Image: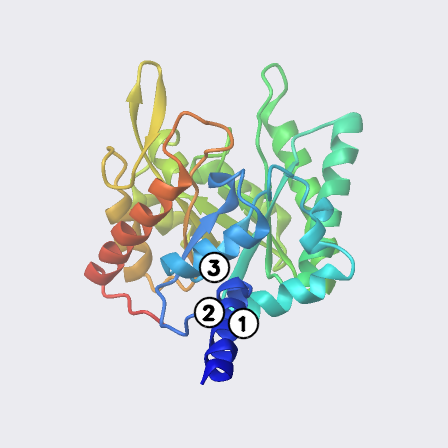
Amino acid sequence: MLANRRTFMTALAASAAAPAVLRARRTRRYPIAFSTLGCPGWSWKTILEQADRLGYAAVELRGVANEMDLTKVPELSGSSLGATKKDLSALGLVISDLGASAAMHETGAAREKALDEGRRFIDLAHAMGVKYVRMFGDKLPPGEPRETVIARVIEGFQQMAAHGKPAGVTVLMESHGDFTNSKDIEAVRSGVASDGFALLWDAHHTYVDGHEAPAATYGALGRWIRHTHLKDSTPAGTDRRYVLTGTGDVPVKSQVQVLATAGYKGYYCFEWEKKWHPEIEEPEVAFPHFARTITQYLEDAGVKPA
């Protein structure tokens, strides 16, 4: 009897210390994701454990443990990458996309650095089996003709799409910075003219900065939207403050309804900008709140877990 109890206690202790992949829950999940921009201090293990525990289906990689260059993250490099892919598979988690900082408006040495980063992230996505890499059009510098900048942005994305397409990786431009209205975004999309290029709809930015209703943005760009960023905010003087989903004045529920009604097949991704705004709530508060709130929005819109 003593030997049996000792064997049981040893097995129990081993189970408690086992990696998250051995305790993965096989449950149906709604198509929700979070960006690691919202948890800059979390380790790779914590990211996976929390995504699984909170019921997320996917994770967008935008830095890990304060390292923003994903090609330098140990778990995504060398011999560790194979184990990482097995852990993700065991947990039933998907990496929705890789978030690069590369901005196609840049010139000179900054442009070469951006293009190099874009290529490296595409190569990493290929090695990981990730479908998308996000980049930016970003700025329309004052004093430079708008048409000149847009042409440069188009040419940069053409280079990125050409690098990504043979690898099976689609490059996404986010509605961000000075590219938050449908007209400018569509000018870039049609100019790139590649099926290796598509769009990431940051629905906050097109509403707050682009002053577009969700249905209008989706009506103009929906055919090319492959991924989304969702977040809420309120006015704060001349700026905005990010707040928990559903407590601000951004119509997140309407954005979800527009996507669901149109048959959107991507992830509803929470981009909580904790890395850039350390004063906002901790991920331990914001991530479960988003999961609960967005699940209700999806249920109300008729979206089912898979």
Which mark, residue 58? 3
Which of pointers 1 and 3 indicates the residue nearer the eye? 1
Which element type, helix, strand or loop, lies under badge 3? Answer: strand
Q: Which residue is mark 2?
A: 24
Kindly indicate whether the residue at mark 2 contacts the one at mark 1 (C-beta within 8 angstroms): yes
Q: Earlier in the sequence, mark 1 or mark 3?
A: 3
Residue 155 in the image, given as x and y percentages of width and height: 70, 41
Residue 56 visible in this rendered orientation of the protein: no
Q: Residue at x 69, y 47 (%)?
A: 73
Tell me the crowding category of disc 1: few under 14, some 14 to 19, or many 20 or more residues within 10 angstroms, Cα based.
some
Kindly indicate whether the residue at mark 2 contacts the one at mark 3 (C-beta within 8 angstroms): no
Which element type, helix, strand or loop, lies under badge 1? Answer: helix
Residue 15 visible in this rendered orientation of the protein: yes
Q: CA distance from mark 3 to mark 2?
A: 14 Å
Q: CA distance from mark 1 to mark 3?
A: 13 Å
Residue 224 in the image, given as x and y percentages of width and height: 48, 55
Q: Amino acid at mark 2?
A: Ala
Q: Earlier in the sequence, mark 3 or mark 2?
A: 2
Which element type, helix, strand or loop, lies under badge 2? Answer: loop
Q: Amino acid at mark 3?
A: Ala
Quadrant containing the C terminus in the rendered view: bottom left
Q: Residue at x 60, y 20 (%)?
A: 141
Near-viewer residue (41 or 128):
41
Q: Which residue is mark 1?
A: 90
Residue 146 in the image, given as x and y percentages of width and height: 58, 25
